Image: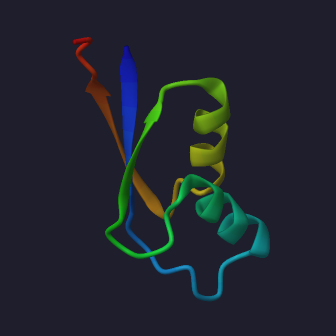
Amino acid sequence: MRKLKITLKKSLIDKQKKHKKTLKALGLTKIGKTRIFPDNDAVRGMIGQVSYMVEVEEIEHEAK
């Protein structure tokens, strides 16, 4: 199963309210914070909205 590793790279200061809410929904509230999410359309849409502020890596999650 594919996963996405998302890291916040830019500050939320002076950004659009919509983008701040998207990052809060992703759990990215501080610069450098990283979260892992399943690779699906909903998460990809959120990333597309704030792509200029985050770094995304695809990782292969191994089933145990």
Q: How many marks?
A: 0
Residue 48, above or below 32: above
| Image x and y of residue 28, in percent | 49, 63
Determine which quarter of the picture holds residue 43. top right
> Residue farthest to the front?
64
Q: Is 4 on the left or on the right of 59, as rendered? A: right
Q: Is residue 12 left or right of residue 42?
A: left
The answer to which image quadrant residue 2 occupies is top left
Identify the residue at image location x=74%, y=75%: 16
Q: Please give the name of the residue rendered at 77% of the width and 75% of the height, measured from the top-left corner.
A: 17
Q: Is residue 40 above or below residue 6?
A: above
Q: Does 38 sit left or right of 50 as displayed? A: left
Q: Quadrant of the C terminus?
A: top left
Farthest bottom residue in view: 14
- Quadrant of the drawing holding the N terminus: top left
Residue 53, horizontal then vertical, whole percent: 49, 64
Horizontal and vertical percent position of residue 8: 41, 64
Residue at image point 64% right, 26% down: 41
Q: Position of residue 20 (x, y in %)?
A: 67, 71
Q: Name the outermost residue toward the right.
A: 18
